[in-house]
Amino acid sequence: MILAAIAECDAMGRDGFLDTYGYGRARGYLLVHGDRRYDSKAIAGVAHRGVDGRPLRPDEFSGGRESVARQLVRLGFEVDAPGLSLGEHTIESLVLKIGSLRTDTSRSAGRPRRHQPLTLLWALGRAAQAEPRLEAWARTSAEISSLIEKFGHADDQPNPEFPVLRLYHDELWDLDASDIPPRASTSSAQRWMNSHAPTGGLRPWVHTIVSRHPDVRAQIVLRLLEKYFQDADHDELLIAVGLSGTSDAEVPLNQGSPAPRRRQSTTMRMIRDSALAQQIKDLHGHHCQICGVRLRLPNGSYAEGAHIRPIGQPHNGPDEPGNILCLCPNDHVLFDRGALTLTDDLQVFDEVIGQITGDLRLAPQHTISVTHVAYHRETARQVTRPASPSELRL
């Protein structure tokens, strides 16, 4: 719904869109999408058409932080607050930069070196713990060196100077110094960093995004882990950088009862790309791609983003559009459990009755990966046979 309103605004132009629906230009909060910004209240009001068939008039609801901005952020979109303009920087540009780090290759492992990924994970952990954006070089150097020694490849030297300067020149890192050298060799980087000892940390726009959007931060962490740390202990690494924690406080079930005590623990779990899943659902108008059902709730429509190839181990599917379906909760369960699969020409196959039941509903901007479809189908058909009646007897 939001994406449909954005597309309509792009087609009509900002002034035409606002005039058509009677909205004025936003004075504060702007919805960020791609490299453009939109009047948040107008977009939200027009998008409401997908809920009850008509757009809202400007006088029917209020804009601002506590209404429109909060709802858009909850849906996974980025909203610029008054007095905080990120300029050309967006969530998408940050994810793109993280995904295109230029790293050397470890001779011993034949894989990308881990200096930059570990430096970023360290900074993301600080953001998650609400620590200051900038830190003295002595502490930065010591902590990142320790991470490289523990989680780097065998030939990864514990030298954080070079990755910090690389991240600076890639516009991800901030250094409190005025004569920062150009891209340099490891030895010259070490000499300059150790002689100047600059305070540093994530750039303000990067820190703003990863602090305000835990889902984006988790998405970045997941991508770093999958690309650079395939053979590392992810739980141990997350704990080391401050992105995971446990609480072993023992809590009684109820006071004065002989019932056993329970151990309660919490830990960080990788969060899916909620903004991407929301975009997929918007493209399909929250209609299930299998049965066509659209669930209506008091506060809008409901559907679920279903990964064709699961993103968890051992499947390690990607969190990308071609691997996501918009499904109702019932078909999501049936699809995940292998009761429903897809043919290579995207027809729905019922594995229980052994026949095709219809075509998968498609959208022009959403291309499904046949590779992931085939993986899901083959995995579903490898399930064990049902137990015989004798095996079910108690």
Image (cartoon, rainbow, N blue to C red):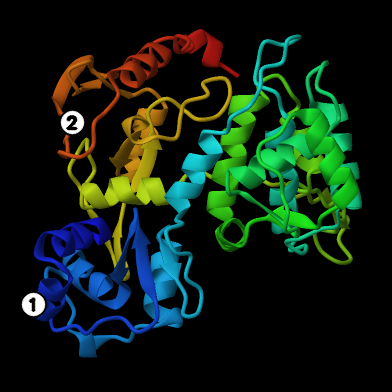
CA distance separating discs 2 and 1: 35 Å
**Front residue (pair 55, 102):** 102
Looking at the image, do the residues carrying marks 2 and 1 touch, with CB atoms under 8 Å apart? no
Residue 213 image position (x, y, % from top left):
55, 59
Give the residue drawn at x 45%, y 80%.
Answer: 65
**Front residue (pair 382, 215):** 215
Query: What is the secondary structure assignment of the residue under circle 2?
Result: loop
Residue 3 appears in view: yes
Residue 299 image position (x, y, % from top left):
32, 70
Amino acid found under the numbered disc labelled 2: Leu
Give the residue drawn at x 15%, y 25%.
Answer: 357
Left or right: where 156 falls relative to 290: right
Query: What is the secondary structure assignment of the residue under circle 1?
Result: helix
Q: Which mark is residue 360?
A: 2
Give the residue drawn at x 40%, y 60%.
Answer: 77
Left or right: where 72 falls relative to 294: right
Residue 174 vs 338, above or below: the answer is below
Q: Which mark is residue 20?
A: 1
Q: Tell which circle, 2 or 1, labels the residue nearer the N-terminal end.
A: 1
Residue 36 vs 71, above or below: the answer is above
Amino acid found under the numbered disc labelled 1: Thr
**Front residue (pair 232, 385):** 232
**Which quarter of the picture shows residue 147?**
top right
Left or right: where 144 falls relative to 322: right
Give the residue drawn at x 45%, y 48%.
Answer: 93
Residue 165 image position (x, y, % from top left):
71, 42
